[in-house]
């Protein structure tokens, strides 16, 4: 029989390898998916350049971080990137507005079909990709400084006396807090402010919103600013947690699309839920539960294999698979998307 | 008339660009670019069939190209008999299980009406299927992969001439397209784009990680060629005679026999590489012309007219009783088959199959730029787009470096900014690609050679 | 001197002209109704007045001012409010939010107008927090009219407000429209239910093939033999 300690150990194990990483990865996906969903809700096209917009924002954060580091400005135990983030948000928002004015605005005013905007976003994707690689190079960049762990696995074991430790990286906590604040602010904005309501109205019924006197140019501009802000935050958090590499960010596009579509594209709450579901699926389906079951089950029943549903090789493919399944079985997603 | 003239001039310009590369850089490079231009043109034709004829947006080009590449491996590699005896049955049994599970799910969806019962049954079938797969598949895979992993570690292929794979690649891609099409073609255009992008990534993930199939990221190298090898050529008498005949002028000026032979040997070595490339060009051009012939026939047939009418007004076509889904499926399969053919040709030309090299930027989005820039709906336009964009893709790199050199010429050689700019210059080709796409889309949305307006 | 005057309007959506020189007049504080057979250009005439349709000929005057060239959004500022026939509420927003959207351009305190709307349509007060998409057809129509009222309009345009609602709801809706009129708002209605609409109308216009066939006061048209036979079913 497994004792209470065994059970606690089993769940500590699960927390360390599944729960904590999935929450932070899920938060990053949620922020990214919110940006995609907002653009889709207002401008009505799937923005293939969003992953690269994230990369651009993160790059600006990194450049500011390096600059601050060279000036010996830091936030103590917090990463310097947090200080750089607001500057990066401003610059990335300006960048997004330039893209809107120079590329997307034309098709929007011409009432081009969404597919044309999608193709235009592919062109934008190429260009941002080039800009990022040109400025910072295609290689891995680590820009994390400050205190790495809130609690280390060893310390956790010492404090609790358990044989399984839970390590919590400071980036994970930062990710969670920043995400909570960002999401709360966004939902307050959308549901409580006049402009936010106008945005939702525009997304719901464009013609009626125009008849009510909503200014479409202003709504579109604000949407880009919010999307760029969220992209910068999501990218920076992902880069702090793991590392920054332009190609990885481009590839993040798919789990982000998967999150947005799973939740119901155009639905902000759906994007958040979708982000966490995708993150948990990726990690839970590829985690080897062997040790977990050894704790829980009597020795005679102990598993011999790894008890892994899918090889970690397919970690990335899981989100694509969920994406395809959702698109086929329930294209409107969990929260019946299409409007904010 | 003007259209035709424009087409001719565009292709002439393209031709001179390639000649210029031959004159200023090297003929070998020029031919290498030309061959990949041809393959790009075929890929662009494949996308054009889907997007230009029918308005289907397939952002999963890479997947079909890779499946074609897989065909090259499976057709040309000799079978690994040891691996077959070790795990062949396990693999076949596993495939059989997958088929049965799919069939059962299909039956359940057909026969059982209650939604809850249906879902539970489907779920149970999948779980049972997974457990069974676990039992047969994993051991089979590990025993296959254990056999001489440095060289084989996979089941091998059919040991047939690689050129057959060009057809097999098309068939593979068509089969996959049939499955994907059945699943996704009902979706809205932007969802279809995302779904196909996702599926192509899944295909690449499978090719990367299923080592028993094609060695995964360990790659299959040294694929047999449909054309002679340079080393062999250099030994053939007729080839040496040919080269000495062509270079008669140059050779006759040299008196010393030794020097003459030395020069001839060098010429033969140099020319053998060119000759191989020219052989490839011949094969590729033939395939391109055959596909173009059928594309033009199709485009001008009643079928092509119907396709366009569906593309231009889906609702009206629907109202007229056309089965849009069926037509879309047809065109999706045809276009994908062309992509598969191009994929097999590419792998043949490269002589190796490297799943890790398939990246959406190069194998999906670049092909899309070719079609949009060349002219969607126009076969010759897509071919021109394939040529032009591939040429640009290759030549943009030296051009950016050259431009950057001019730009930074005032800076000192040791300057950090200069070295960074020079190092980063190659990335500008992505920028140029995006810019070309955006400029075309904005100012010439129908491409360089627009679709001809036909009177119905 | 009429409040709104759409004069000899000619235009269409690119193909053949749908309006062939029809004229619509609405007097201040009155209800005008456009009736006519299907495809007569009733809704098109209203869209022309709103500016959603480019006119080839003719002009539109509001309060003596020429507004032919002004965009539909600008016309909102001139005191025009429009209730479309379909898709006339924000489905994913609450009733309250729908009403607030009507007042989007207003800087002043909207509580007074809000209370007026609630007094007009008491059921909206009860369903204030409910999503408009979850309401019944008649209630949605009330939200739509309420949203338009929130702009504090001088001139209200209704495109077939009773399409798809039950007869009881329809009668009530017409009563409410009369109440709105009594607050001094001029109203233009396009209606299928010609009899009920004409019974509340001060002015009626019968359109056929994009031109005025018969015009007159509501009661005149109701008693006109021709109109009765063709549009009122005897």
Image (cartoon, coloured by chain):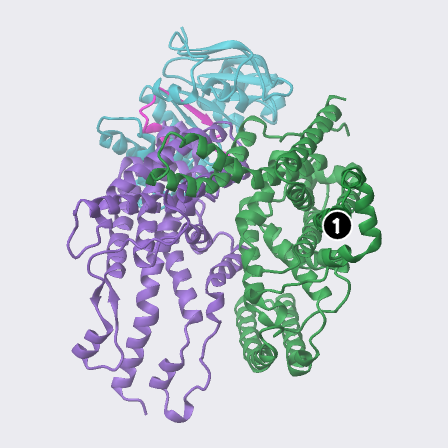
Decide: is B178 above or below B160: above
Q: Is residue B315 left or right of residue A209?
A: right
Q: Which residue is mark 1?
A: B258
In this picture, residue A94 sits left or right of residue B330 = left
In the image, A61 versus C81, the foreground residue is: A61
The chain under label 1 reads B
In the rendered image, the vertical position of residue B70 relative to residue A99, given as above or below? below
The letter of the green chain is B
- Find numbered disc 1 in the image and state the secondary structure of the residue it sits on: helix
Is residue B242 left or right of A183 when viewed as pictured?
right
**Residue closer to the observer: B325 or A204:** B325
Q: Nearer the viewer, residue A40 or A74?
A: A74
- Looking at this rendering, what residue extends furthest in the front direction? B256
The C terminus of chain B sits in image quarter: top right
Q: What residue do we see at 58% from left, 37% from top?
A: B392
Q: Nearer the viewer, residue B327 or B167?
A: B167
> Does the image show residue C133?
no
Highlighted range, magenta: C146-164
For chain C, the rendered hue is cyan
Residue B322 location, x and y as percent? 73, 44
């Amino acid at each position: 029989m497994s004792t209470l300690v065994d059970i606690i150990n089993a769940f500590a194990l699960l927390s360390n390898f599944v729960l904590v990483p999935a929450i932070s990865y899920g938060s990053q996906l949620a922020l990214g998916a919110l940006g995609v969903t907002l653009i889709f809700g207002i401008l009505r096209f799937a923005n293939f350049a969003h992953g690269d917009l994230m990369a651009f924002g993160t790059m600006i954060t990194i450049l500011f971080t390096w600059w601050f580091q060279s000036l010996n400005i830091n936030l103590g135990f917090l990463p310097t990137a947090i200080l750089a983030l607001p500057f990066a948000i401003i610059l990335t928002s300006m960048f997004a507005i330039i893209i809107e004015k120079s590329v997307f605005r034309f098709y929007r005013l011409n009432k081009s079909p969404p597919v044309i905007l999608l193709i235009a976003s592919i062109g934008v994707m190429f260009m941002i990709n080039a800009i990022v690689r040109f400025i910072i190079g295609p290689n891995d960049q680590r820009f994390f400084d400050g205190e790495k762990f809130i609690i280390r696995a060893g310390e956790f074991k010492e404090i609790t006396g358990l044989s399984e430790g839970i390590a919590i990286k400071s980036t994970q906590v930062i990710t969670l807090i920043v995400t909570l604040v960002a999401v709360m602010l966004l939902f307050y904005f959308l549901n409580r402010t006049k402009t936010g309501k106008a945005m939702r109205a525009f997304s719901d019924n464009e013609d009626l919103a125009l008849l009510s006197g909503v200014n479409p140019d202003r709504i579109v501009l604000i949407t880009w600013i919010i999307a760029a802000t969220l992209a910068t935050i999501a990218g920076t958090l992902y880069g702090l947690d793991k590392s920054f590499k332009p190609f990885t960010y481009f590839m993040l596009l798919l789990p982000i699309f998967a999150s947005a579509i799973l939740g119901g594209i155009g639905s902000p709450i759906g994007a958040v839920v979708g982000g966490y579901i995708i993150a948990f699926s990726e990690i839970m389906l590829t985690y080897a539960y062997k040790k977990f079951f050894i704790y829980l089950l009597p020795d005679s029943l102990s598993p011999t294999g790894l008890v892994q549903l899918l090889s970690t090789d397919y970690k990335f493919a899981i989100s694509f698979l969920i994406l395809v399944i959702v698109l086929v079985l329930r294209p409107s997603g969990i929260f019946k998307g299409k409007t904010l | 008339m003007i259209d035709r003239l424009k087409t001719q001039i565009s292709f002439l310009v393209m031709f001179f660009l390639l000649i210029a590369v031959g004159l200023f850089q090297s003929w070998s490079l020029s031919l290498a670019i030309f061959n990949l231009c041809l393959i790009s043109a075929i890929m662009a034709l494949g996308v054009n069939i889907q997007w230009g004829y029918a308005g289907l947006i397939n952002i999963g080009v890479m997947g079909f190209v890779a499946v074609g590449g897989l065909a090259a491996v499976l057709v040309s590699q000799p079978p690994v008999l040891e691996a077959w005896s070790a795990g062949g049955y396990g693999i076949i049994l596993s495939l059989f299980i997958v088929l049965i599970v799919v069939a059962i799910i299909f039956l359940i969806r057909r026969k059982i009406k209650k939604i809850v019962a249906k879902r539970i049954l489907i779920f149970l079938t999948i779980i049972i299927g997974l457990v069974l797969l676990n039992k047969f598949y994993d051991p089979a895979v590990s025993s296959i992969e254990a056999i001489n992993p440095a060289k084989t570690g996979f089941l091998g292929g059919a040991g047939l001439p690689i050129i057959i794979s060009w057809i097999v690649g098309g068939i593979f891609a068509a089969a996959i397209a049939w499955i994907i099409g059945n699943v996704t073609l009902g979706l809205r255009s932007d969802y279809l784009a995302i779904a196909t992008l996702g599926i192509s990534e899944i295909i690449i993930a499978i090719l990367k990680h299923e080592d028993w199939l094609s060695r995964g990221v360990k790659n299959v190298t040294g694929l047999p060629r449909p054309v002679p090898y340079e080393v062999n050529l250099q030994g053939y008498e007729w080839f040496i005679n040919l080269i000495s005949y062509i270079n008669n002028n140059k050779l006759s000026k040299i008196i010393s026999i030794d020097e003459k032979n030395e020069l001839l040997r060098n010429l033969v070595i140099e020319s053998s590489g060119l000759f191989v490339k020219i052989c490839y060009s011949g094969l590729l051009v033939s395939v391109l012309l055959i596909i173009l012939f059928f594309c033009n026939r199709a485009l001008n047939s009643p079928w092509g007219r119907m396709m366009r009418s569906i593309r231009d007004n889906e609702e009206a076509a629907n109202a007229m009783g056309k089965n849009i889904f069926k037509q879309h499926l047809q065109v999706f399969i045809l276009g994908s088959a062309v992509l598969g053919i191009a994929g097999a040709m590419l792998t043949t030309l490269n002589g190796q199959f490297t799943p890790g090299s398939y990246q959406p930027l190069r194998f999906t989005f670049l092909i899309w730029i070719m079609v949009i820039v060349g002219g969607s709906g126009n076969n010759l336009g897509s071919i021109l787009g394939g040529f032009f964009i591939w040429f640009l893709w290759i030549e943009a790199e030296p051009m950016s470096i050259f431009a950057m050199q001019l730009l930074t010429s005032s800076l000192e050689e040791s300057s950090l900014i200069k070295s960074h700019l020079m190092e980063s210059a190659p990335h500008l080709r992505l920028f140029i690609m995006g810019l070309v796409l955006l400029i075309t889309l904005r100012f010439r949305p129908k491409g360089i050679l627009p679709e001809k307006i036909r009177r119905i | 001197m009429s409040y709104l005057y759409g004069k000899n309007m000619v235009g269409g959506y690119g193909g053949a002209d749908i309006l062939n020189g029809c004229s619509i007049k609405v007097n201040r504080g009155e209800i005008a109704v456009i009736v006519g057979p299907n495809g007569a250009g009733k809704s098109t005439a209203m869209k022309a007045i709103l500016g959603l349709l480019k006119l080839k000929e003719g002009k539109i005057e509001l309060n003596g001012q020429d507004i032919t060239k002004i965009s539909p959004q600008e016309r909102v500022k001139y005191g025009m409010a429009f209730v479309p026939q379909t898709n006339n509420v924000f489905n994913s927003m609450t009733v309250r939010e729908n009403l607030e959207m009507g007042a989007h351009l207003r800087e002043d305190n909207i509580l007074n107008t809000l209370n007026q709307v609630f007094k007009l349509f008491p059921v909206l007060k009860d369903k204030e927090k409910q999503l408009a998409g979850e309401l019944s057809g008649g209630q949605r129509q009330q939200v739509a009219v309420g949203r338009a009222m929130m702009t504090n309009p001088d001139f209200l345009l209704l495109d077939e407000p009773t399409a798809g609602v039950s007869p009881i709801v329809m009668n009530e809706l017409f009563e409410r429209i009369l109440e709105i009129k009594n607050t001094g708002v001029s109203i233009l209605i396009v209606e299928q239910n010609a009899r009920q609409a004409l019974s509340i109308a001060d002015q009626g216009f019968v359109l056929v093939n994009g031109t005025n066939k018969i015009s007159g006061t509501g009661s005149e048209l109701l008693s006109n033999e021709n109109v009765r036979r063709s549009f009122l079913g005897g």
